[in-house]
Amino acid sequence: MARGHAGGMPIPRRFSLVSETYPPEVNGVALTVAGLEHGLRELGHAVEIVRPRQTEPSSPQREGEWLVAGAQMPRYPGLRFGLPAGRQLLQRWQQQRPDALYIATEGPLGGSALRVARRLGIPVATGFHTRFDDYAGRYGVGFLRPLVFAWMRRFHNRGNATLVPTQELADFLAGQGFDRVRLLRRAVDTALFHPQRRSAGLRTRLGLAVDDVAVIHVGRIAPEKNLGLAVQAFRALQVRQPNARFVFVGDGPSRAELQAANPDFVFTGVLRGEELAATFASADLFVFPSLSETFGNVTLEAMASGLPTVAYNYGAAREHLRDGEHGAAIACDDAAAFIDAVIRFGLDAELRQRSGAAARAAIAHLSPASVAAGFAALLNELVDRRAA
């Protein structure tokens, strides 16, 4: 593989992306990695994906992928994590050395990749995608939060750059002793997620009447997502707006309990691609009460779909959602204000239409191509710095 530049143009390089999750799994990390992979390939780079074998029959090994052993993620059916693979990675990368690595996950596979890369002198960028320290608190082991955070800091500081999606997170991590933090904004496919995908037929299939106000939540149905507040806010709206309907898109360990307690809600299960985009566009209001996100890709997808959004003011919302203009960006942990905002937007069709159009316009510049170009430039910078 050639190195350097020719005539001012970057020479294609070989990059390895290591992730313990990848489509058809549906989560922010998997979709982000897939988007970066596609973008690098479009720029002419050779890309290798290193990931665990998945259980779904729809996920066979593709060209450019290397599958390693994995195990079931506890409490999350359909999600797996990679087992340690240091010896295999060492042999593979000694034979076919990548110019740089991107490690998206801090699990056993990611840890193996980081150790091997350091041994071989391969530059590494790591992705800070998930606040595992917050998860510890929400799963009843809050006493472990300082240890988890210290472990994450040590992991990322062993790389050459830690990539984060928001300036807010970059500032926070830098203040907590994380070295070499770099901002790489997330992209959203504005051609896929588009208001024109709104479908009267789809609304009918979901059991929605013409005048129903469809409130939607998209994401993992799990304890850390604070879904009790979403239900509480919707019920408060329903008192004032009896034709409001709640649509849950996704799956997770809390689905059965939530569905049993709310038989009038619509649960679609996991949706992907055009089906997901059409469901977004066919709704009227997106609510996202989670306080455990590192970013929250679904916020951008909702805004691209022309939906006013009610979310807490951090992550993607803090970076892109303007309170009162695109929806409501609520101060963290102000549950009363969150409920009030859901009621306000649920009752006012004109406000929803105006805010949804403004939300769509606000994120039109976040194209996958521009984000991939920035990602490639950062990896090339690490390669050139190592060569120098």
Image: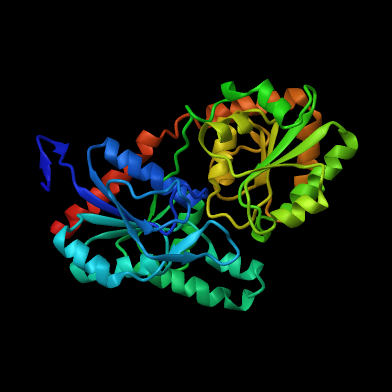
On the image, the x and y values in percent for residue 152 come to: 45, 69
Q: Residue at position x 59%, y 65% from top?
A: 134
Q: Work out which residue is located at the far right of the displayed protein and give it.
A: 239
On the image, the x and y values in percent for residue 122 come to: 21, 62
Q: Is residue 323 left or right of residue 159?
A: right
Q: Nearer the viewer, residue 241 or 10?
A: 241
Q: Which of the 4 image quarters holds residue 12?
A: top left
- Against 43, is 34 above or below? below
Q: Is residue 84 left or right of residue 355?
A: left
Query: Count of labels shown?
Result: 0
Q: Is residue 334 visible?
A: no
Q: Quadrant of the C terminus?
A: bottom left
On the image, the x and y values in percent for residue 370 come to: 36, 35
Q: Is residue 381 visible?
A: yes
Q: Is residue 336 left or right of residue 43?
A: right
On the image, the x and y values in percent for residue 84 come to: 36, 71
Q: Work out which residue is located at the far front of the displayed protein and give it.
A: 57
- Against 366, is 130 above or below? below
Color theme of the render: rainbow
Q: Nearer the viewer, residue 219 or 187?
A: 219
Q: Nearer the viewer, residue 76 or 352?
A: 76
Q: Residue at position x 63%, y 75% from top?
A: 141
Q: Residue at position x 81%, y 34% from top?
A: 244
